[in-house]
């Protein structure tokens, strides 16, 4: 799969949600960047794909369900996000688990994403 970008910011998130402020910080950074009309893409790597699960129990740790935030990304003109295809398989996620606009990317496409952005922010 070929990845096309505008060379702006790539936000990489690698942590599952519950109790992880890094997961929320990655989404907040992507949304804030987009709100200022800056080109931004979001890449969910490794355990970060678990943020995409629609049913998350985050009430016990007092954290907002990140999937709801992810589903609001089109309001910020973030129409798609990139998702580690190997991690989706490893954690047993299905197409129904992924948000609208999710693009599965293998290792080669991930490298292409990393190479094509001017700024990479890892969380």
Image (cartoon, rainbow, N blue to C red):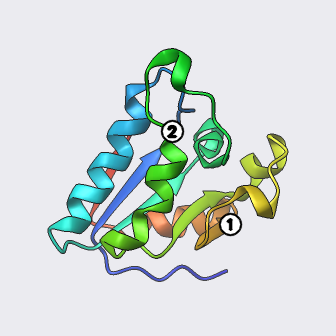
Q: Residue furthest left?
A: 36
Secondary structure, mark 2, is loop
- Where is residue 94? Give x, y as percent: 82, 56
Instruction: Report the label total.
Output: 2
Is residue 119 or residue 61 the one in the foreground?
61
Quarter-of-image position of residue 116: bottom left
The answer to whether the residue labelled 1 contacts the one labelled 2, judged by CB atoms less than 8 Å apart, is no
Dividing the image into 4 quarters, which one contains the N terminus? bottom right
**Which numbered circle lies on residue 94?**
none
- Where is residue 6? Give x, y as percent: 32, 81
- Where is residue 114? Give x, y as percent: 44, 61
18 versus 116 height, above or below: above
Q: Which residue bears the numbered disc 2? A: 65
9 with respect to 105 (left or right): left
- Where is residue 31? Give x, y as percent: 29, 58
Is residue 113 or residue 21 the one in the foreground?
21
Q: Earlier in the sequence, mark 1 or mark 2?
A: 2
**Observer able to see residue 5:** yes
Is residue 74 or residue 38 the one in the foreground?
74
How dense is the environment of label 1, judged by Cα within 10 Å: few (below 14), some, or many (20 and up)? many
Dividing the image into 4 quarters, which one contains the C terminus? top left
Q: Residue at x 70, y 63 (%)?
A: 106
86 with respect to 118 (left or right): right
36 with respect to 42 (left or right): left
Q: Residue at x 82, y 42 (%)?
A: 90
Q: Residue at x 60, y 83 (%)?
A: 2
How dense is the environment of label 2, judged by Cα within 10 Å: few (below 14), some, or many (20 and up)? many
Q: Residue at x 44, y 20 (%)?
A: 62
Q: Which residue bears the numbered disc 1? A: 104
102 with respect to 27 (left or right): right
């Amino acid at each position: 799969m070929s990845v096309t970008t505008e060379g702006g910011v790539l936000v990489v998130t690698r942590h599952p949600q519950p109790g992880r402020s890094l997961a929320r910080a990655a989404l907040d950074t992507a949304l804030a960047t987009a709100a200022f009309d800056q080109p931004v893409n979001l890449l969910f790597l490794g355990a970060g794909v678990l943020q995409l699960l629609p049913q998350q129990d985050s009430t016990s740790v007092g954290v907002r369900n990140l999937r709801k935030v992810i589903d609001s990304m089109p309001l910020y003109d973030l129409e798609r996000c990139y998702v580690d295809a190997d991690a989706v398989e490893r954690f047993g996620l299905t197409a129904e688990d992924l948000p609208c606009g999710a693009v599965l990317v293998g290792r080669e496409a991930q490298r292409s994403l990393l190479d094509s952005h001017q700024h990479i922010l890892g969380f």
